[in-house]
Amino acid sequence: MTRFKLSLLLILTCSCTTFAEKALSENLFTFFSMLNGYYSNKVQLVVDELDAEVEDEHDGINAIWRPVPIAALPDDWTFYVEQSVNGVVNRMHIVVFSEDEYGVIHGQVLNVKQPIDYKPKQYEYADLTNVELESEPSPPECELLFTGLEKNVIVGSYPDCISKNNRKTPAPYSFTVTCHAFTSFVCSPSTFESFARLPYIFYKKRRYELPAQWTEGINFTVPCNF
């Protein structure tokens, strides 16, 4: 894929970012505070081994959802997303978040160029401000959607646009985000992850702080007693 300079990425994505001049809303602040973190389903793997009656099997997955300012997208709220399945990194994204007038949170996925021999969590403590991105934004059908269900419970969908089969309509993952964990249901057997009847359950192992420039001048209550 032809790659352009990062400065051109802003031109490619600006049509999807209508919130650049707005302050961080309480809804987004709550969502970002809850979602960000390093997650693992290691506990679930132990349960799989012990509960033979369920006859279900989950892959070992680690995931990073880290709020990171991106130099090429200075007015956007961006997260670095990394997922490894059984020790193999298969997703490296920057997700650009926005919010519509109804409080629904939208996410546009931008692919990160994966360095040769990259290892899981290699970027966890790195300065990702100038991370190298692919030039093409994701198509509209790959948009993430999240909405509040009740206090400190958020549900959403994450279309699978990069797994084993190319599909006109990508099969989504369904998400439920709570204070210290999130669950994801694999809705298609053609994904990177093993198809399982029970959702994947990921517990937060560490949490990242929101960038200071995002929270300057706001005084919202931090959710979940973080």
Image (cartoon, rainbow, N blue to C red):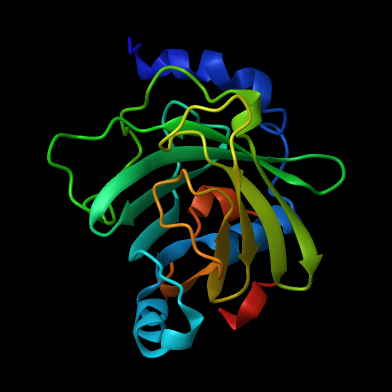
Of residues 148 and 199, the one drawn nearer to the viewer in this rendering: 199
Confirm whether residue 220 shows in the render.
Answer: no
Residue, far bottom: 50
Name the spot of residue 167 as percent of width and height, x first.
55, 28
Q: Height in image: 115 above or below 28?
A: above
Q: Height in image: 208 above or below 124?
A: below
Q: Find residue 41 and report its image quarter.
A: bottom left
Q: Find residue 224 and report its image quarter.
A: bottom right
Of residues 121 and 127, the one drawn nearer to the viewer in this rendering: 121
Query: Residue at coordinates 44% horizontally, 64% vertically from top-left?
Result: 37
Of residues 32 and 86, the one drawn nearer to the viewer in this rendering: 86
Q: Height in image: 100 above or below 28?
A: above
Residue, far right: 102
Name the spot of residue 186 as percent of width and height, x first.
54, 55
Name the spot of residue 27 as percent of width and height, x first.
74, 57
Query: Residue at coordinates 37% horizontally, 49% vertically from top-left?
Result: 82
Q: Is residue 1 left or right of residue 165?
A: left
Q: Quadrant of the N terminus?
A: top left
Query: Residue at coordinates 25% horizontally, 35% vertically from top-left?
Result: 114
Please tell me how many numbered marks the rendered image carries: 0
Name the spot of residue 19 as percent of width and height, x first.
71, 34
Q: Is residue 213 left or right of residue 80?
A: right
Q: Quadrant of the C terminus?
A: bottom right
Confirm whether residue 128 shows in the render.
Answer: yes
Of residues 106 and 142, the one drawn nearer to the viewer in this rendering: 142
